[in-house]
Amino acid sequence: MIRLFKHYIPHAVVLLSLIDVGLLLLAGELAWHMRAQQIGMDPGNISQRVAPLSVFAMVIFAAMVSVGVYGAESLRSMRFATARLLVAVSLGIIGITFVEFVLDKHNFWRSTLAYTMGLSIALLVANRLVTGAILGAAAFRRRVLVLGAGARADRLRQLAERPESGFVIVGYLRMSESEPLVEEAIARSAIHNLTRFVENLGVSEVVLALEERRNALPLQDLLRIKTAGVHVNEFSTFIERETGRVDLDTLNPSWLIFSDGFSSGRAISSVAKRLFDVLTSALLLMLTAPLILLFALLVKLDSKGPAFFRQRRVGLYGQGFDVIKLRTMRTDAEAHGAAWATQGDPRVTRIGRLIRKVRIDELPQTWSVLKGEMSFVGPRPERPEFVGELEQQLPFYAERHMVKPGITGWAQVNFPYGASMEDSRHKLEYDLYYAKNYTPFLDLLIILQTLRVVLWPEGSR
C-alpha cells in the first residue's frame, strides 16, 4: 500500500492508474495525428497540445475513478472493468463536449474526440489484459508473516484470500500453547532464529495478530526484524490500511490515541473545505432548483401531504439541526414511532421509490450545507431517536460527531444503506476511518466515487 495524503492506495491501483493516464495522453495524440492526416493538415508540434491533452486525460481519469474502474470488482473481473471503462470514457467525452459548447471554445474537435474515444477504450482494455495478469501474480504482492494462530490470524487469512488482496501470507507462527484456529501455524519454539527465518522466506512485513499480548510479545525478535528492514505492524493498523475502515472488534482507546490521525493541523484544510461547501452548494441550488420543484410537484400529485419535510438530525459535537428533504414516504409513516428504512419499505410512495433511487431527495440538504450545519462530505447525520441507542451499543460512536456531517461520505461509498444495528456498526468503522484520516484528497475521492453510487444505486432503499 502507498499512503497518499493519509489515505492508503494499493500498489496495483497506483501502477494501473499511472499507465492509464499515459495511455490516455497517447490516445489523444494519436487521434490528433489520425484526423490531421485524414484532412491533409500539418499536425504541428506536440507542445502546442499539452494543455488540451492534459485536460482530456484528467477528465477521463476522474470519470474512471467516479464510476469504479479502480474498485475491487473491476480489478478482478475483466468483463466488469470493460463495462465501467465504456461508461467512464463516454461520460468523460460527453462532459468535455458540453463544456466546449458552453464556453464556445474549439480546443477539442468533435471528430478528433470520436477517434480519441475509440482509441482510449481499446488501449485501456489492452492495458488490463496485459497488466492485469501481472498485477494479480503473487510475486507482485507483499509477503506477510503473521505472528499468531487464533481468531485474528484467521481473519487475516480470509482477507488474504480475496482476489483483490495486495498481500500473500507466507506463514503463521503460534506464539502460545493454546489451541490454534490456523492449523498450519508453526510453533515459535520450532524456530531457532526468527530473524533468519524471516529473511529466508523473503518476508516484507510482519503482522502481530496475538490474542493476548501479555508475556507473549517477542520484543527482542521484533527489534531485530525491524532493524533488518522488515516492516512490523500491529493488527488494527494493518486492518485499517487494507480495508479502509477502523476495526471495532479490536479497537481500544490507546490505539486511537497513539496511532497516526486526528491531526490538529487542519486550519487551512477546514477553510478550504468550507469555501468549497459554500460555492458548490450555492451553485448546485441554483442549477437544481427547477429539478427540485418538478419533483416536489410530482410528490404532491402522487400522495397527500407536503412535498418537503423537516427532520431532526445530530450534527457536529452532538448538536441538533433540521434537514430539509423531499418527502418519499406516506405522511403516517412514523405513526408508531421512528424506524429504520428496510428493503422494499411499504411506507415509501411510488414517486418516492424513484426519488430515492436517483438520490434526488438529498438535493434540498444543500441548504444545510450552505448554512454551515453540514458539509458535502462527512459521516451521515443520524436521528436523535437512534443516536442514544447507538452510543450505548457501539463503542466510540460519539467520535463520529467530531467532524461535520455530510450529504455523502466514506461509509456511503463503501457500504450499502444501513438499516440495522449491525449495519450501523459497519458504517461506523468507515466513519471513524474518515474522521481519523480526513484530508481534502479523501474528500475529492469520495465526491468522485459518489457518482458510482448514483449510477449503480444498489444501496438505496
Image (cartoon, grey):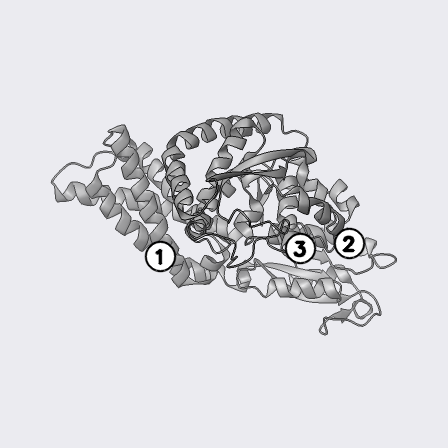
Q: Is residue 243 visible?
A: yes
Identify residue for label 3.
Answer: 421
Question: In the figure, residue 103 lies in which quadrant?
Answer: top left
Please identify the residue farthest to the left as the structure is shown.
40
Residue 106 location (% of width, % of height): 23, 32
Is 407 or 367 nearer to us in this picture? 367
Q: What residue is rendered at 67% in x and 49% in y?
A: 246
Is 353 or 55 nearer to us in this picture? 353
Identify residue for label 2.
Answer: 222
Mark 2 vs mark 1, CA separation in Å: 44 Å
Mark 3 vs mark 2, CA separation in Å: 39 Å
Which label lies toward us, 3 or 1?
Answer: 3
Is there CB contact under 8 Å for labels 2 and 1? Answer: no
Residue 33 location (% of width, % of height): 21, 42
Residue 138 location (% of width, % of height): 55, 64
Is 215 or 89 nearer to us in this picture? 89
Seen in the picture, residue 99 relative to 392 is either above or below; the reply is above
Tell me which label, 3 or 1, sits earlier in the chain.
Answer: 1
Mark 3 vs mark 1, CA separation in Å: 41 Å
Is 95 or 363 nearer to us in this picture? 363
Looking at the rendered structure, the kind of residue marked 3 is: Met
Label 3 sits on a secondary structure element that is: helix
Which label lies toward us, 2 or 1?
Answer: 1
Looking at the rendered structure, the kind of residue marked 1 is: Val
Left or right relative to 434: residue 129 = left
